[in-house]
Image (tube, grey):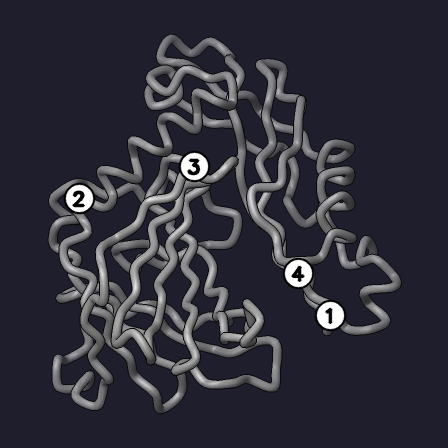
Amino acid sequence: MLPGSAWAAETVLEPLDKWVLSYAEDSCRLARAFGTKDNKIVLVMDQYMPAGILDLSLIGKRLGRYEKNRVELITTFGPGLPVGEAREALTGTVGPDHTTILMIGGRDLLNRHQVKGASDELFATTKEQEAAVTELHIAMGARRILLRTGSMASPLVAMRACMADLVKTWGLDPAQQDALTRRPVPTTSLTKWLTPNDYPKEPLSIGASAIVRFRIMVGADGLPTKCAIQQATLSPEFTKLTCDLLMARARFNPALDRDGKPVASFYTNSVRWLAV
């Protein structure tokens, strides 16, 4: 546990407005601004399937500028929870004024350690746990920022309703999917689906990187029936390649309903194409 005194040097930012929930084509998004109108940070939380993992991004000039395309940081929801793990975020800019964006990636609301490739269902949270979370700490080197989010109970209730509607648009029954005894399980390692040898030559020559979040619809036979890009950085050369390779290589043990019968479902994950 991290003592409260360790956060004494933090810049504390209060909410500037209310949470905004957006229904995207293949995801649900919560966003809220903190700080002042002229010097704010926007916290964006995306969800791509009904589960506890939230994909975090921070947008704001007060985040500073970064020469490298990656920066190590720690995000910790609180109070009274274990400190989050140090992980890399991708840096970039958005808009005509080139405002800084930090694409942090998936984080658990309770700061539990995430094993690469582990199912999002392992990070489900209860309504009581969500209500107790009222802040987010961001540590970047010597810099410390605290966002007073307020209770996450109501925002995440709205997020769940959005996710249920999204599952319907995928042609699935949300109630059936919630009651599955097993979601689709890859039959081979994800590292065999997408390998360093698959990196496009032209982007590699200029050191281009990308994050691609994908959804695979999986039939009752365990075969992929469709690949959709849920979110990606502005790198079209990576998105088509990602789906083409996944449709050719991804194989699953199918989802099972409450009676143990194979049924259609979905699988989501992300890939980082990073030039080293």
- From the viewer's perspective, tell me whether residue 77 is left or right of residue 179: left
Q: Compare marks 2 and 1 and give the one earlier in the sequence.
A: 2
Label 2 vs label 1: CA separation?
40 Å
Q: Are marks 2 and 3 in contact (CB under 8 Å)?
A: no
Q: Are marks 1 and 3 in contact (CB under 8 Å)?
A: no
Graded by Cα atoms within 10 Å as few (under 14), some (14 to 19) or many (20 or more), the crowding at tag 1 reads: some
Q: Which residue is mark 3?
A: 49
Q: Nearer the viewer, mark 2 or mark 3?
A: 2
Q: 58 above or below 105?
A: below
Q: CA distance from mark 1 to mark 4?
A: 9 Å
Mark 4 highlights which residue?
210
Residue 152 in the image: state x and y as whole percent. Answer: 19, 51
Q: Nearer the viewer, mark 4 or mark 2?
A: 2
Disc 1 target residue: 275
Q: Amino acid at mark 4?
A: Ala
| Residue 92 appears in the picture as rendered | no
* Amino acid type indicated by mark 2: Ser
* SS assignment at label 4: strand
| Residue underneath mark 2 | 154
Binning the other alpha carbons within 10 Å of mark 4 as few (below 14), some (14 to 19) or many (20 upward) gives many
Q: Which mark is residue 225?
A: none
Residue 132: percent from left, percent from top: 12, 54
